[in-house]
Amino acid sequence: MNPETKRKIQIVLLVAIAVAGIRAAYVVYKRRGDHKAIEAEKKEAPPLMADYYVTPKRMRPYDLKSAKALTEQPVWVKEGYKYSYYPFSAARHSDFSREAGTLLPIQKLQVKDVVMDISPGSSDQKQIIAVFELDGNDYSVPIGSVKGGNYQIYSDEMFFIEDPRQLYKHWPAETWQAIEQHEMKPGMNELQADFAIGMGVPQSSMDSASKTVKYPNGGKPLTVVYRNGRAAEIQTGT
């Protein structure tokens, strides 16, 4: 191999080594940068709310007999001002023509019985109703239906079968005080609002950073604007 060729090969090798060194340095730098970015995200990301770790028990009733398990412990209403209840007569029938009221937010009930009843306007469908006592009178609230032997029971969506004060005992005392007084306070999240003022109706919005929800609130309507999951604005109105 002549000296000129040898010198060219050496130059090529030196260039290749330099390129490889630069690439290796870049890979190390990039990995360090990615690691720092991941660590920064971990520091900036808020921890999961304790609410996410709460898993309320569900009964999953599938027929009349299994639904009667509602009588074995108190129940608490999940969303107030959403479910209507009706007078229940000694003849064991509901007067669906006369609404007696709506269940209140986290109202505690003791279900006395779960029975089948008529379904207004339908001859081949029956209502599944929960019977409870209030102020010395019996009332009923529909919790499902049956048609052709097919049951649809939604009591798990209506009731807690555990005391929500124990399920969410990590909430501050002042939050529970507001809930028990059915008051909405700044800083509450949507679940706490459900407990305090009942069901809400989300409004469509182009602003992804905020969410507006209207609450009938038993005839005292409120509009709440949430930012970052917390109530930032509370407005009264129709």
Image: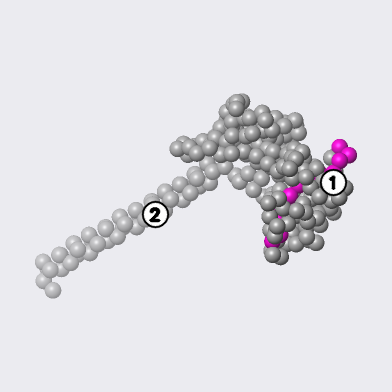
Quadrant in the picture for the N terminus: bottom left
Q: Is residue 142 magenta?
A: yes
Magenta stretch prevailing secondary structure: strand
Up-down: is 118 above or below 11?
above
Q: Residue at x 67, y 33 (%)?
A: 217
Residue furthest out toward the top: 236
Image check: 192 left or right of 17? right
Q: Residue at x 62, y 38 (%)?
A: 200
Quadrant in the picture for the C terminus: top right
Judge depth for marks 2 and 1 and give the one in front.
1
Q: How many marks?
A: 2
Q: Pick whichever of labels 2 and 1 is earlier in the sequence.
A: 2
Element assignment for label 1: loop
In which image quadrant can residue 134 be found? top right
In which image quadrant can residue 20 be found? bottom left
Q: Nearer the viewer, residue 19 or 134?
A: 134
Q: Position of residue 192 (x, y in %)?
A: 67, 38
Up-down: is 113 above or below 178?
below
Q: Position of residue 127 (x, y in %)?
A: 73, 54
Q: Position of residue 27 (x, y in %)?
A: 37, 55
Q: Nearer the viewer, residue 30 or 197?
A: 197
Q: Nearer the viewer, residue 77 or 55?
A: 77
- The residue indicated by pointer 1 is 89
Q: How would you rate the neighbour count of disc 1 (Cα within 10 Å): few for under 14, some for 14-19, many for 20 or more?
A: few
Q: Position of residue 162 (x, y in %)?
A: 78, 49
Residue 164 visible in image? no
The numbered disc on residue 28 is: 2
The numbered disc on residue 136 is: none
Point out the stretch of residues depicted in magenta.
135-147
Q: Residue at x 74, y 59 (%)?
A: 61
Tag 2: amino acid: Val
